[in-house]
Amino acid sequence: MATQSQARRIIGVFVVVALVLVLSLGLLVPEAAAKPTVIGNCRTLAAPGSYILKQNLTTVGTCIVIGADFVTLDLDGQTLTGNGTGVGIYDNGVARKGTAVRNGTVTGFGVGIDLSASAGSVIERIRAAANGTYGIHAGAPSTITGNTAGLNGSTGILAGNDSLISGNIAGGNGGDGIACGNHLTITRNSVTGNGSNGIGVGTSATLTGNTATNNSGNGIGAGDNSTLTGNTASLNGSGAFCFGGCSGITTGANCTFIGNTASNNSGDGFTPGQRSTMSNNTADNNTAIGINLSVGGGLFRRQC
């Protein structure tokens, strides 16, 4: 039978072990996230951190300037409204890192959102409407998801190299719906009724599951070494500037087409570049040629 002294020693050991466990678990529990700073006026966000807008803002010129790296701005469903000048949300031409902008409307500015000098930006769930030129202009690389860019004077969404453009709607813009640089991933976007091309991207792009309808220029255009899978282009190419030369889907050389559909376009259905490969695509009821091989030459075609 244990003596009282032994019992006390055993209890002491248990207490020490319990304290060690408590302290260890405490180190694993993250500190409570700091509350976002509430903003109620147009201003420069001069320090890293989270900011939240709690009222609609109307201004002359630029409204919000991103003045630091790693700024997160939540518009919280509010609207920034301009007078046709300036920028709604702007990096001021300075190379910022890690900016995130989400959840609101930016309208009536010269440019809706301009983070073109910045890298690693995230723009999501923004409605960029009726701005003078670009709705959203982002640098390289950026992630642009779930936004609506409509009725802007030029391009709806413009992004730099290596960006991800996914789940956006771009319609009724004066220029391209979506126009981007090289090495892009473009997925599940809808581009309709734009004054130039629906989607126009550079080389080595991956385009999957996009829909381009009733754009004045090409429905979808991509540069060399791109892969296009499961995209649909219809009723494109009606612009007078096309002269019958616009296509539902057109690319540069060495591209891969898999399971795309081009129908009822005013020019060709598909215009692939040289040494491109096509498999299981559908070209139906286009005004010119369903699949125009004369431009590319040397095309290897399978099951088209």
Image (cartoon, rainbow, N blue to C red):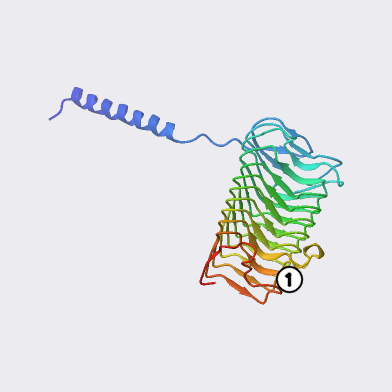
**Residue 243 x, y percent position in the rendering:** 78, 66
**Residue 286 x, y percent position in the rendering:** 68, 74
Residue 168 appears in the figure: yes
**Residue 190 x, y percent position in the rendering:** 66, 62
Secondary element at tag 1 = loop
Q: Quadrant of the C terminus?
A: bottom right
Examine the image and state in which quarter residue 288 appears. bottom right
**Of all residues shown, which one is farthest toward the left?**
1
Q: Image point 51% across, 72% down: which residue?
A: 303
In the image, 13 versus 109, the foreground residue is 109
**Residue 21 x, y percent position in the rendering:** 35, 32
Examine the image and state in which quarter residue 147 appears. bottom right
Q: Quadrant of the N terminus?
A: top left
Residue identified by numbered label 1: 266
Q: Is residue 51 above or below residue 197?
A: above
- Which amino acid, by three-letter code, is at mark 1? Ser
Q: Is residue 288 left or right of residue 13?
A: right
In the image, 115 versus 177, the foreground residue is 177
Q: Is residue 120 above or below residue 133?
A: above
Q: Image point 38% across, 31% down: which residue?
A: 24
In the image, 48 versus 294, the foreground residue is 294
Residue 77 appears in the figure: no
Q: Image point 60% across, 35% down: which residue?
A: 34
